[in-house]
Image (cartoon, rainbow, N blue to C red):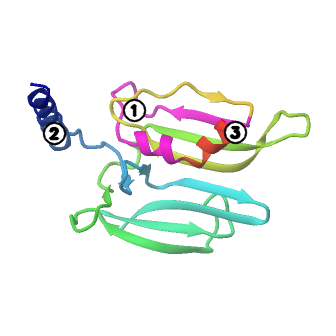
Amino acid sequence: EDIINNNIIMFLIIISLFFGAICATPLNCNYINMGFNLIQPVNECVIGKTKADSLYSMAHFCVGGNKVESRVWSESNDCQGDNYQITNTFDCSSNSTFVKCNCRSEPKQVCTTVIDKQFKKKEDGGCDTKQVTEFRQYIINEDQQCPDSFIDSNCFERSCQNNNNGAPGFATVGYWMDKLSVFKKGTNA
């Protein structure tokens, strides 16, 4: 009887995941889904790092209709300047890769995003909020609300920009950013 109950439960889970994937609400903003539920806004700097003398940043841009171009700066932590490398261009109309994207929304339609920042720690133990050593920006799951903003004793800050004018949230990030984030190590130290 337990085997039958377990099989019924597994069947219901599979059916609900299948219908959830089919009936998922499309995003009403420009985005790129890099897989693993990592969805980032387009036309914004999404990653920036400063470590010793090394700088790095990344952004995605809508180009040529419904395509997204990924750019990496190796001498900038804020996606500024003309010295960048185009790492890939994705055709949002294609189903040939696991990367999904959209560049058909109006530029003023901005996704609700979470921003994680790591600040430099002062000698007195406080946080120097003018010196960001790392940041990441990503879109939250449609069924999630903006998390409460906070800054912890390790100078890690999480904030949310609710850009949907009171409508339900837009996209997906969820599980993997929480589980795989480099910030997770810093906050658990």
Position of the C terminus by quadrant:
top right
Image quadrant in which you'd find residue 188:
top right
Mark 2 is surrounded, within 10 Å at the Cα level, by few (under 14), some (14 to 19) or many (20 or more) other residues, namely: few
Provide the residue designation for mark 1.
164
Taking 23 as reference, is 49 above or below it?
below
Which disc is residue 189 wearing? 3
Say which amino acid is labelled 3: Ala
Q: Earlier in the sequence, mark 2 or mark 1?
A: 2
- In the picture provided, is 138 more to the left or to the right than 63? right
Q: Earlier in the sequence, mark 1 or mark 3?
A: 1
Region of the chain picked out in magenta, as a range: 154-180
Position of the N terminus by quadrant:
top left
At mark 1, the secondary structure is: loop
Which disc is residue 52 wearing? none
Dot in front, 1 or 3: 3
Q: Residue at x 36, y 41 (%)?
A: 172
- Mark 2–mark 3 Cα distance, whole angstroms, equals 37 Å
- Mark 2–mark 1 Cα distance, whole angstroms, equals 31 Å
- Mark 1–mark 3 Cα distance, whole angstroms, equals 35 Å
Is residue 74 visible from the viewing direction of this image?
A: yes
Give residue 56's position: percent from left, percent from top: 64, 63
Query: How many labels were placed on the picture?
Result: 3
Q: Residue at x 44, y 50 (%)?
A: 40
Mark 3 is surrounded, within 10 Å at the Cα level, by few (under 14), some (14 to 19) or many (20 or more) other residues, namely: few
